[in-house]
Image (cartoon, rainbow, N blue to C red):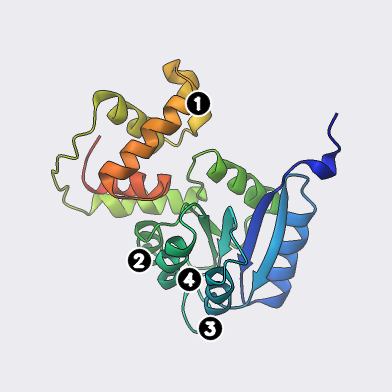
Amino acid sequence: MKNLNDIKRTEVVVIEDNKLFRKTLVDFINQSSEMSCINDFISCEDAIEKMKSNELDPSIILLDIGLPGMNGIEAIPILKSISPSAKIIMLTIQDDNESIFNAICNGASGYLLKDSSSDKIINAVKEVLDGGAPMNSSIAFKVLEMFKNFVPEKKDYNLSSREIEILQLLVEGLPKKLIADKLSISYHTVDSHLRKIYEKLKVHSASSAVAKALKENLI
């Protein structure tokens, strides 16, 4: 039997300028048996410099919006270009429509308010790793309300019937495992379909695919 210390933990980077909140995040991430904070930064510039030097390749980035210098929304595409596989979860006190929309469209995989409990944030990391797009209920409501105001753009992305079916379930908030169970197909088959969906929609995350599906009335 493997020792728990030998099990690979999900590597997380925290970018947050509030010292007390940053320390709190780092502490409860490191207290989890499944995750480890490999570095934390007070600015996007510092994180980007470190990641460009190939010293960091996190699976998850917890990213504040209101940072000194480059803000979190501006940093998302840069961080994604350096580490395409990294999933970015926004942690912020801002829940205005513009911030939500811009963060999702830039490639954020989730969006949580800073008053979320430690369990909620840890569960959000797990959900993102499983292909979900976690949001506070209040933010999810704002997203739905926000997209009601957009005129749907009819575009043909040549999605297959199965891909449309999976995209529909993704919009409903189901993670990959539950999608697989519901459709009676394997987890890896769902993962393969999702990669094709992302490629066709020209997005890089589940949240961006959901945003595009809602905005352009694809489902």
Specify which label sits upstream in the sequence, 3 or 2: 3
Specify which label sits upstream in the sequence, 2 or 4: 4
Residue 75: x %, y % from top left: 45, 71
Q: Is residue 203 left or right of residue 187?
A: left
Please state which of residues 184 and 94 is positioned toward the viewer in this rendering.
184
> What residue is pinned by disc 3?
68
Frontmost of labels 1 and 3 is 1
Specify which label sits upstream in the sequence, 1 or 3: 3
Q: Give me the residue at 52% from left, 71% from top.
A: 52
Frontmost of labels 2 and 4 is 4
Residue 57: quadrant of the picture? bottom right
Instruction: Pick the quarter of the image with the C terminus.
Output: top left
Give the distance between the C-alpha atoms of the residues marked 3 and 2, in whole angstroms: 19 Å
Vertical position of residue 173 compared to residue 119: above or below: above
Q: Mark 4 falls on what kind of element?
A: helix
> What residue is pinned by disc 4?
72
Mark 2 crowdedness (10 Å alpha carbons): few <14, some 14-19, many ≥20: few
Q: Residue furthest bottom?
A: 69
Frontmost of labels 4 and 1 is 1
Please state which of residues 59 and 100 is positioned toward the viewer in this rendering.
59
Residue 187 is marked as: 1
Residue 209: x %, y % from top left: 34, 45
Instruction: Pick the quarter of the image with the N terminus.
Output: top right
> What residue is pinned by disc 2?
98
Could you tell me the amino acid type at mark 1? Tyr
Please report contact status of discs 3 and 4: CB closer than 8 Å, yes or no: no
Could you tell me the amino acid type at mark 3? Pro
Q: Give me the residue at 33% from left, 49% from top.
A: 211
Could you tell me the amino acid type at mark 2? Glu
Give the distance between the C-alpha atoms of the residues marked 3 and 4, in whole angstroms: 9 Å
Give the distance between the C-alpha atoms of the residues marked 1 and 3, in whole angstroms: 41 Å
